[in-house]
Amino acid sequence: MSQQGSGGNVIAAICNIFFPGLGQLVQGRIMSALIFAIIVFGGYALWFLIVPAIIGAIVHLWAIIDAAKYDNRSG
């Protein structure tokens, strides 16, 4: 994508709202996408244990912010 705050980053952040890790995948960061998706879906799958669901929700929010603030020039 371009730089922080670009339209591509906004689209990536919106993608992450619906499917965690999809925004990173749109940006071409496959490993980040896999890690975010595994942690979030694992946490949500174990919702009855409460703590993993809270961790999943925090990582889900982190994935959204990470996609929105990604700067291609820094990495």
Image: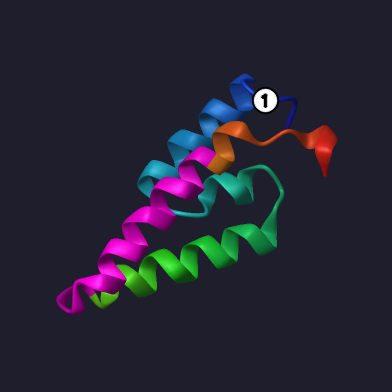
Q: Position of residue 38 (x, y in %)?
A: 48, 71
Q: Secondary structure at mark 1?
A: loop
Residue 33 versus residue 49 in the image, above or below: above
Q: Is residue 63 magenta?
A: yes
Colour scheme of this structure image? rainbow
**Going 45% across and 69% down the picture, which residue do you hit?**
39
Farthest front residue in view: 51
Q: Is residue 46 magenta?
A: no
Quadrant into which the C terminus falls? top right
On screen, residue 7 versus residue 43, left or right, reads right
Residue 1 versus residue 40 in the image, above or below: above
**Going 70% across and 53% down the picture, which residue do you hit?**
29
Farthest left residue in view: 48
Q: Position of residue 62 (x, y in %)?
A: 47, 48
Q: Nearer the viewer, residue 64 or 58?
A: 58
Quadrant into which the N terminus falls? top right
Farthest top residue in view: 6
**Going 35% across and 64% down the picture, which residue do you hit?**
55
On screen, residue 31 versus residue 34, left or right, reads right
The prevailing secondary structure element of the residues shown in magenta is: helix
The crowd level at tag 1 (other Cα within 10 Å; few <14, some 14-19, many 20+) is some
Residue at the disc numbered 1: 4
Dividing the picture into quarters, in which one does residue 7 lie? top right
Residue 8 versus residue 28 in the image, above or below: above
On screen, residue 64 versus residue 29, left or right, reads left
**Going 73% across and 25% down the picture, which residue do you hit?**
3
Residue 29 versus residue 50 in the image, above or below: above
| Segment colored magenta | 47-65
Q: Position of residue 51 (x, y in %)?
A: 26, 72
Q: Amino acid at mark 1?
A: Gln
Q: Position of residue 67 (x, y in %)?
A: 57, 40
